[in-house]
Every structure is written in C-alpha cells, then in structure tokens.
Amino acid sequence: MQEHKTLVFAIEKFAVNDGPGIRTVVFLKGCPLRCIWCHNPESQTFNAELLFNSDRCVNCMMCAGNCPEICHRAQEGRHIFDRNKCVSCGRCSVTCPSGALNCIGQKLTVNDVMKEVMKDLAFYRNSGGGLTISGGEPLAHFTFTYALLKEAKTSGLHTVIETCGFAPWEQIAELLPLVDLWVWDIKSSPAKHRELTGVPIDTILENLQKLTNAGGQVILSCPLIPGVNDEDEHLLQIAEIANRLPNIQGIDLKPYHPMGENKNRQLGRKKYFK
Amino acid sequence: MNERIDRLVKAARSREIFPVTVPVEYDEFDLKLAEPLRIAKRLTEYMAAQPCYFTDDNELVGMMHFDGSVEADLFTRSGHKNIVEALSKYYNQPQENLCTMEWQHSNADFGKVIRIGLTGLRQEIIEARRHYHNDISRLNFLAALEAMIRGITRRSRQYATECRMQATICQDPARKAVLLRMASNCRQVPEYPARTFEEAVQCLYFCFMFQPDSIGRPDQYLYELYQNGIANGTLTREHAKELLQELYVMIHGWTRFGCPNADRGAESHFVIGGYTIDGSCAWNELSELILEALLETDLIRPQISLRWNHKTSRSVLEKILDSERKDKNKRIALVNDEPRIAAMIKNGIPWETAFDYIMVGCNEPAFQGGISLGGNTVNIVRSLVNTLNDRRAEVLESPDFDSFYAVYEEELHNDLETILDYSNRFNMLRSRDCNVLTSLFMPGCIERAASINQGGAERARWCANFMGSTNLIDSLCIIRQFVYEEKRCTMETLLAALDADWKGYEELRAAILNTGRFFGNNDELSNQTAQRFYASVNNFAQGRTDIFGHYLCYGNLTGYNIHYARYGALTQATPDGRVAGSALLFGSGQANGKERDGITSHLLSVAGMDQTGVMCGNTIMNISVDENTVQNEESFQKFVVLVETYFREGGLQLQLNHVSARELIAARKDPDKYKSLRVRVSGFSATFVNLSEQHQENIIARTVNSL
C-alpha cells in the first residue's frame, strides 16, 4: 500500500483556510466533476499536463532541444507549442529559464507525501493543525487517500478531507474513522447540478446524510458564483441541509475568484466560464 | 495621545526640534593638558555654552547636539579626529573585495546612572583612584571623568535655573507648577539617584545626549520606580505614557531633520521583554505601556525588538505581532533569547551578564552599558570564488563532494583569518581617539581607568557580517547536487560556465535555477550543506578571540549601506546561477522565488541552519507576508503560532513586511504616490521610495514569494 503511487499536483504548506490550525494540503490530480468555474482546472484530469504561459515566454527555444516529441518550434521568432503531440514528460520545463513551462502532476507514493507532510509537524503540534487532502477529488484516489490518512493517523495528525462527495458510500464509510473533519462541497441546487458540474447531486446528498448520521463531522463548503448559483434555491438548500443534518459544524460560503481562467488558457482549453 | 504630545510629534515630524549649536572658542593654552583632561575641559566649556532649550510643550529637558569641535559621544564619534580619518579611507570601501569598515553601536548604562546618580559614579572614581596611585595616565583619565561629572551637573543645574526662572514669569498656574517640577527634577537628576519615574525619565532624556544610541532595556531599569509611583498614587499610567512619548519625540528628533538618515531609525533600537536575572519572563506592565506609547506616536524612531523566550506567553507574542501589523512606521522586530543566550554562555559569558543583553543599531546584540565591536561587513562568497579559481587543479581532481569541501574549507578559513586581521586593525584605528564623555556611563571604564574604545569596556562583543551567505550555501548545494550526486554536469563544465558568466551555458543555468536544491526549502541536502558551512565557521571561531579578547561570532546584516551590492559588483558568476556583478544576498533567508516550498520550510531551514551558535551575532531574517494573512483575524492567529514555532525551533530573529511585490514595483514607478510606504530593510525600517535602487531591488526580490 505504501508503494502505491498517485498523481499529486501540489503540496501546499502553511495552509490557513483548509481546516483548523496550520496545515499542509495535499492536492491530488484528477476529479470526476467538471465544474464550469473550477479554479484549479489543472486538477481535473488524471494525467500529468503541461501548462504553457505564453505571457512569460521569452522565445529562447531552449525547450525545443529537450523535447523528445518535437512539440516546440519557433515560427517567425515566436514559440509555437503543439499540445497534441505533448506527452507531458516535463523535460522542457526543466530548462525553461522564464518559468513559462510547468509540468503539473508528479507520481508520488504515500511515503513520499508523508515525508513532506511530517516536515511541518512542529507547526501542527503548536497550532492544532495537520493534514488536509484536497484535489482534484481525493475520493477518486481512494486507495492512496486511504493509505495516506492511515499513515497520518498513525503519526497522530489531525486530518481533513475536502471532497465533492461523489463516490461510493462504502469508500466514504471506510475512511470515516480516519477523518477528523470533512469539508463537503454543496455546489448547486439539484436542478442545475448536472449542468454546472457534470454529475447529479443525488449521490452527494445521500452520502452526506449517511456520513453525518454515522458521526462524521462536516463543514459545508459552498462556492457562490455570481449569476450562476447564487440563487435563492441554492442558498435555501444549504440552509435546509445545515438545519436538518446532525454534525454540521459550519457553512463556508466561498466567494468566486477567477484564478482558474488564466490556468485554463495555459492548459490550452479554449472555453472557460465567464 | 494628548494634545501636548500631538503637538510635539507634529513638530518633530516637520522640522528640526533640537536647538542650534553655539560655537565655542576654546582656550588654546589647554593644549598643555593631558589629552583626557583637555577633552573634558573643552566638553565642559562646550556644554556650558549651549542654550537651555525647551518649548512650552516640554516637560523633559536637556536637548543638545555636539558640533564636532571636541571628542563627544562615542556613537557619532563626534570630534574623534582619528576615526574620521580612518573612516574616510575604509568606511564603505571594500578592501580586497573582502572586508569593509563599518559603524559601531553601543549602549550607555542609563539604568545605573538613574539608580546611583553621578554622585554614585564619583564614588566609583574615588575608589578606582586608589588602585592607580602611581599611574599618571590613568589618574588623568579618572580626573577627566570627574571633570565630566562636574560639567554635566553644571548643565543640569543650568536647566533647573532656567525652568525656575520661566516659572516665575509664567502666568498660567498649571504650566507654572510643571516648570517648578521640571526645575526640581533637574536639581535631582542626573546628579543624584532618581526617586520617581518622572525623575528617571528626565535622567534618561538628559543623559541620552552623551550616548545617543540605544536606551537598552527601559522596561527593566525603569520598572521599579514605575511600580512605586503607581502603588503610592504619585504616578498615573497616562502620565507615564506621556513621559515615554515625550522621550520618543526627543529620540526621533535627535537625528537631524532632513539628513540622509532621518528616514531610518537604527540608532534608536532598544528591547522590551526577555528574561529577568532569576530566569523569569521579564515582560511587565511597563513593557506593554512602552509598546502602547510607541504605537500612538506617528514617529519613525525609536525602533523596538521584542526579546522572545520560552517564558514568553503567546498572548504577549500576539500583542507584539498585532502591534507590528498596525505600525505603519515599521518600528518593531523580534529576536529569540534562547539560541543567543545559549551561545553567550557557551563562550564564557556568565548568565548575570547574558540575561541582560540588548539589541542596538540595525540588529546588533550588545550588553547594557556595552559596545558592539566589529560589525564590519565581509564578502563570504569570495572564499568560494578563490577555491574555484586559485585551487582549480585540486577542485577538478576532487572525486567527491567531501574532497571538494575540504579544499573549500581551507579557503574559508583563510578568509576568516584575513577578516579577523582586518577587523583587529580597524578596531585599533578606532582606539586612537580618547573618549571621556560616553566612557563615564560605560561599566569598566572607571574601574579600568580607560576609555571605552581603548580597552575600558567591560562588556563588549565582536561580530563580522557575512554578505552572500545564502549565495554561498546555494552554490555549495549546486556543486554537490549537479556535479557529484546527480552528475548532471561535470566540474569542468560548471567552471567553464562560470568563466563565461553563463554565456553559452544558458540551458545549464536554467536547469540550476529550476531544479536546484536551494537553501530555504527544508530539503535534506541544502539543510545539511548550510549546517556544514556554519560548522566550518564555528571550527574557525571556536577558542579564538579578537585582539581585545572577545569571542568571535558572525551575522549577516548589511546596515544602512549596500555592501551586498558593492561586493556583488566585484564578484564573478557563482554556481547558484547568479551572474557576475549582480548583488549578493544578505540576511539568513532566501529570495528571488528560490524558496519554493513555502514559508514553513523557509523558516525551518533558517531556524536549523546553525547548530553551533556561531551565527548569534548581527543576524536577521526577513519575511514578506501577504497583507490578507495578517489582516484576517483567523489567519493572523495562525501566523502568531507560525512565528512562535519558528522561535521554538531555534530561529534567531524575524522582521516582517506586509507589501506585495506589485505594490513595491508600482512605488518605484510612481514614488510620489507611495511617500508613506515604510518597509523593513536590514534591521531597520525606511521609506521605500527613499531607499537606494539596490535596497529597493533586494526588497522586491525577497517579496516575490510572499506567503
């Protein structure tokens, strides 16, 4: 289990908005949802990806010499990147002097991740913090997430999981004893959920009910996107869930920020929510 | 803040508040006198000739500047002709691209004169005289100190007379009563011990002119009189605060209005908190009042460090950091007692002295009534450049990193030896002038009957400041990683790249910058390399002393001057990806986004870099914090824990900026819009747009990765 690898797209230290105390957030790459406003679009696919920021490119073409697939070429002095050929090996990003090329997604074992997480143990102990697993969608990496949480618990860490809740209940039930706090997304009213995220809300709500009934401690995390889901129906649904279910510790209304737009462009995806 | 203080603050911020100096024609027949006696005679004449100056808003008196016509205070070295000549040759001028002469700070033992008065000092002089009955030069020195006591007493009596005279013509009964109280205070102090908090602050205010540098630990030496006054009802908290604020106005105004350093505040640095002699937490109600009084006054000086230690409660740390985030003048920094006191004790300083250390200048540890010797800045990168150039054959033959490092360590020790030699020579130059004014207030000078800069100082510390220590550690890391461990390039290739200033080797440089295991990422390789380097420094320093017998320790601040840029301009490309001629780094931390793993890793690397305590000198650590992190209450609480943990893990010092790189860049483009933007630089704060271009660039570079 320790040797099981999964794609990690970031490990963020001194996270202050992802649970109590000072935390390290491990972001896993890959998510079953496709929220149209996703602020981490590089977290959606289950494979490594190359971000190309043309604004930072100085057209030095050092990347071309290191690319086995010949994805990078110069045309009239400008760098042209052919994403279709790219296998996201990341070799070009190593010698990119301007930081225009970044390979996102590194396959790591639980031991690799725990080694990084445990470096900040002094901060967790002094602040009541610990490990937060986020994504992407951690439940879509069940085997890895389970093993990581188990290691974290063995090391005495407080654990938080940030999830959209779209997963088989059996998996959630298995994680239940290993998770101190669930930060659970409620993204939209039932009527628009599939349209906005790509999946229906039913499973998510059923899992939430079972989780809270089973004693799981939950904070509802609710992104509010102006003109998209900031409607009465959605807000009433959040209030109703919070009132009806046990063990809801709070509601975190998250304002929209457009950080995903630039990253979407760097991923070569043309469409982005406006 | 009441209206009186508000008027004083506004005056200090808008114009020169000190009286104009009155020139004095000295009787040239005094040349026949022994040097200390001549100096004392002229100082006495000078002080007597200066006007007694105060405004209707003052309750404290004594303001006076020296004009350079006679050897006065040790801080400015006013009138010290030999040092002025030496500084003209060596100050700010790198010798062999290795060492330059810097300013020095010290702290008069104000607590002692408050406690025993000048009469107490006179008793000590009488006692000392018995030990030197056959030594005419020492007896002359003691006679000069005694003459100084008479001169200072005469000046305080002049003030008493002036206050009484103004009281007789004053029509306002309230002001009349204040003037009479001022006259009474001046009759008491500094001649006799202070009996009240007000007398003590008057004594401090008056004696500051004789060593206008740090005021040390006022929350300790003023505390007993503060407590007594509050307990017996003769002092209110509000009045005590008013007195402190008036003191701050004077300290702020002491630096001449409009002079280049008027924008900065290092000469005013003092500490609050720390330990008491019995090992308890020294933070008290007066510490809190000193901080509160500071925050209410819109002044640039004085500047304060909190001495944190294991006994400091989180609520005190929170109070300091809360004050820090609210202080737009950026006057507050933090230091950690634990590693520093441990290093002092390891080097033979007794607890009874060590517990009472202070911070002076930009960020220089000293003792109350002590001098900070050395402080010279040095180019520590030169040792590596010499290794790569002068020892090239051995470098190329080194089969592994350990072999390479052995060659490097020899060069490091060679340079440390040369640095010590330079420092000794500079300090000998400093000792050519005799000082009697400040020496009166410095422990040891009476007992040893010697000027503070001529071996009289009982409590002194030696330090040299490394410019480029992070460049050096990073360069060692790259050599270890790229040449020996990952074998991504040969030593020949790396040396060729450095010789060519990376031209033709841009790909290698990019790979180094993108994937180098740089210091500040809590990475095993870079942490070990840093620890190994500082252990090598310690191996050199251990058991050695400077020419006056002080143990050696090191730091990394640059002070007001851009030493890091000057050395950088003369230094070739280095393996960390730095191009020839570019500025070196100063301080303990990283910059330019090389601290990729975030603030916790950055802090832990720095906290653990020196296992020996050899860096417990003038060491600073700058971090930039996103304003949202400190303004949001929930994340601010976590930030407090972050700082506390850093100190618990051994971090020595911390100073903060809360601006974004974008804001700093905008300020450079449009300075008029950002005239009030204050930043921490190198142990002191300054208005960003008034800083040199190099200082501005350095701050932007280390702000890139704000947390």
Image (spheres, coloured by chain):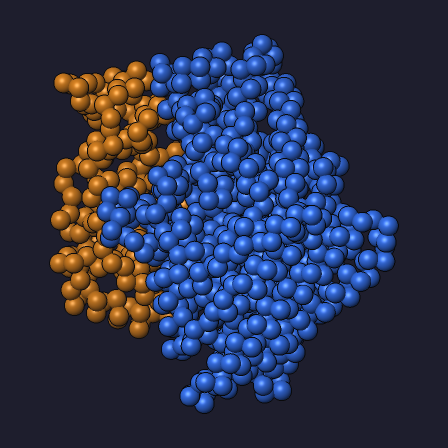
Chain colours: A orange, B blue
- Taking depth in this image into account, of A222 and B230 the one nearest to the observer is B230
- Taking depth in this image into account, of B257 and A162 the one nearest to the observer is B257
- Taking depth in this image into account, of A62 and A2 the one nearest to the observer is A62
Q: Would residue B378 be seen by someone viewing this image from the given angle?
A: yes
- Answer with left or right where residue A94 lies relative to residue A254: right
Q: Residue at x 53, y 56 (%)?
A: B24
- Answer with left or right where residue A149 lies relative to residue B138: left
Q: Would residue B315 be seen by someone viewing this image from the given angle?
A: no
Q: Which residue is drawn at 56% across and 19% down?
A: B386
Q: Which residue is drawn at 13% across and 49% down?
A: A274
Q: Where is residue A56 in the image (x, y as percent from the top left)?
A: 25, 32
Q: Where is residue A190 in the image (x, y as percent from the top left)?
A: 19, 60
Q: Where is residue A19 in the image (x, y as percent from the top left)?
A: 41, 58
Q: Is residue B371 above or below residue B405?
A: below
Q: Is residue A185 above or below residue B231?
A: above
Residue A241 image-quadrant placement: bottom left
